[in-house]
Amino acid sequence: MTLRAALVALLLLAAGPLHGEPAEAIRTESTALFVSPLRPASWMRGDDGKLHVEYDLLVVNTFPVPVAVSALEILDPAGRTLGRFTGTELNAATREILDQKALSRLPANGAAAIKVDLELEGGPVPDRLTHRIFTSLEDAPAPVRALFTGAPIEGPEVSVNTAPPITIQPPLRGEGWVTFNGCCTPALHRNVRHSAGTRIATPETYSIDYVQLVNDLPFTGDGKENAHFPAFGQPVLAVADGEVIAMRDGMADGAPHTPAMGLRGPPDFGGNYVVQRIAPGVYAFYAHFKQGSVSAKVGEQIRAGDVIGKVGSSGNSTAPHLHFSLLDRPDVITGNALPFVYPAFTVTGRITQVRDDGIEIEKASQAVQSAYPLAGSIATYE
């Protein structure tokens, strides 16, 4: 074949089929975002009577321009819409991985995580969920905009651990215990994520910072001393039977309203702490004990209700409180949080607003069974 004949054949091939046959349409599933679940979803019943399904979606912007997630729909295996998030609610749930800054748009070539709280009025909890995610561009050069189809992202699928949450006893007794930084609203704990090589861990989805109120206030006087806080020195109780596998004591309590000092490594964040194995793959973590108060010893078998220390303000703490959580491994930085419920407690109020000059509380008197105390709840544990 001559060079001229070869070029003619190549041009005919590039021109498409002969005899007037239609060319096959080019189809594309190009999207601006990559979306994937960080781990399977879990669930528990809140003190509002609803089932809360919790999970994180990792979202990576592969475009060199900002991209907005305008809507997130959650669907069951039959395609029924179970939830839809837009606007400020979606923005509040979309956060930078570690810094936790809320995002209305993903930065160019950036990543974020969306913390999903799917509320269901009743069961059963679906074993799988999928999504329909809508995105938009604002300003983009022509070549980039040409890659943006505008079609919604179908997926990803998230498996749901449908096993019931673990039932444990409360770690505290008495009145006025507030769930600060708990599930299921955007807060310091729920949005904690730490990379661990091949995964991004979510160690504090269900963690609770317990602060005690007296006369609707967390402290008396000017609150400049730990002794001004009613929580300081209160006994901390084991939530279940199990073996103490790690503990620490001797770290000084920090002064209230001052940044944490002396944090030299991951173990320092918990200050004085106790880690207890209560079941295979289930670890109770109690943190910020008062210096010199930890009575639990490594290797000791303790029972539910045993006193293991006193509430303090050691480690990463700016006021006396108890940090409590359940984890799937004895690592408070890279473990994943596990859901839990208490057999019974009484909700006496809910915090509706925290101001510089006080706390707004909606009073209540609600007996609750087999539930988790949601963020802002004020409870009595007997």
Image (cartoon, rainbow, N blue to C red):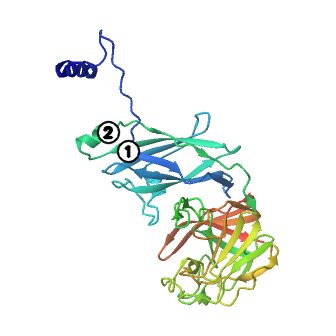
Q: Amino acid at mark 2?
A: Leu
| Residue drawn at 67 percent across, 63 percent down | 328
Q: How far across and how far down the image is residue 42, in percent? A: 65, 53
| Residue drawn at 47 percent across, 76 percent down | 356
Q: How far across and how far down the image is residue 235, in percent? A: 73, 82
| Residue drawn at 82 percent across, 74 percent down | 303
In the rendered structure, the answer to whether residue 138 lies left or right of residue 210 reads left
Distance between the alpha carbons at the discs numbered 1 and 2? 8 Å
| Residue drawn at 56 percent across, 78 percent down | 269
Q: Amino acid at mark 1?
A: Ala
- The quarter of the picture where residue 211 lies is bottom right
- The quarter of the picture where residue 78 lies is top right
- Count the labels in the image: 2
In the rendered structure, the answer to whether residue 135 lies left or right of residue 74 reads left
Name the outermost residue toward the left: 4
Placement of 320 over or under 327, stated as above or below: below
In the rendered structure, the answer to whether residue 203 lies left or right of residue 285 reads left
Q: Quadrant of the C terminus?
A: bottom right
Name the outermost residue toward the top: 19
Residues at marks 1 and 2 touching, judged by CB atoms closer than 8 Å: yes
- Tag 1 secondary structure: loop
- Residue at numbered disc 1: 32
Placement of 108 over or under 152, stated as above or below: below
In the rendered structure, the answer to whether residue 341 lies left or right of residue 13 reads right
Of 58 and 291, the residue lying toward us: 58
Can you tell which mark lies on residue 106? none
Q: Quadrant of the N terminus?
A: top left
Q: How far across and how far down the image is residue 68, in percent? A: 37, 48
Can you tell which mark lies on residue 147? 2
Mark 2, Cα crowd under 10 Å, few <14 / some 14-19 / many 20+, is some
